Structure formats: structure tokens, C-alpha cells
Image (cartoon, helix red, strand yellow):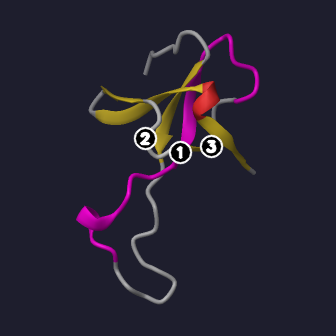
Amino acid sequence: MNFQPLGKRVLVSRLDEESVTSTGIIIPDNAKEKPSRGEVVAVSSEVSDVACGNTVVFGKYAGNEISLEGKKYLVLNVEDIFGIIK
């Protein structure tokens, strides 16, 4: 994939949330919330805090969704990222 974010933006692939609760209840797809964490796929040259491969947490309604090569991604401003999961 050849996508380079501009400005202070990153390209993120959402990570799926658990579909079973800790008590064993299965959550159907239509009842799940949008995942609020993902893996950074591409980083603008203006961004130094986040790197490709980092798992990040962001706001539920942050960013803009785009489709590249049949897969959905999220373009986020760095300010919309709350932190990195280590």
C-alpha cells in the first residue's frame, strides 16, 4: 500500500474488540461499538510521537474512514490519539 498521510496525521487499522464478555456472553456484530484502538500503518513525516506498528487508543468518533485496496482504515490527527499501548 502506498499511502502517506499529510500534516500531523496517521493511518490506523482498527483492531476488533472482544466478541465474548468475561462471563461468556456473546455480543452480536450489530450490538458492538466501534473499536477505539488500532495499529498504526502509516505516519506523516511531521509526526515523531507515534511509529508504524504501535497500538494506539483514540476517540470513538475520531478521524475519517477511508478504503484502500478493499480494506477500511482510519486517518487520525495526532491530537485524536490518547496514548500508545505497550
Taking 6 as reference, is 66 above or below it? below
Where residue 8 appears, as percent x and y from the top left, is: 61, 16
- Residue 32 lies in magenta, yes or no? yes
Residue type highlighted by circle 2: Tyr
Tell which tag, 2 or 1, sits nearer the viewer: 2
**Badge 2 or badge 3: first in the primary sequence:** 3
Disc 2 secondary structure class: loop
Q: Which residue is denoted by mark 1 in the rendering?
A: 38
Where residue 27 appears, as percent x and y from the top left, is: 33, 74
Q: Residues within 10 Å of mark 3 (few under 14, many from 20)?
A: many
Residue type highlighted by circle 3: Val
Residue drawn where x is 44% and y is 56% of the image: 16
Residue drawn where x is 68% and y is 11% of the image: 46
Taking 34 as reference, is 49 above or below it? above
Q: Which residue is denoted by mark 3 in the rendering?
A: 56
| The furthest residue to the left | 30
Residue type highlighted by circle 1: Gly
Badge number at residue 61: 2
Where residue 43 appears, as percent x and y from the top left, is: 60, 21
Disc 1 secondary structure class: strand
Magenta extent: 27-50
The reply to whether discs 3 and 1 touch (Cβ–Cβ < 8 Å) is yes
Q: Residues within 10 Å of mark 1 (few under 14, many from 20)?
A: many
Q: Residues within 10 Å of mark 2 (few under 14, many from 20)?
A: few
- Residue 4 lies in magenta, yes or no? no
User: Residue 56: which quarter of the image?
Assistant: top right
**Badge 2 or badge 1: first in the primary sequence:** 1
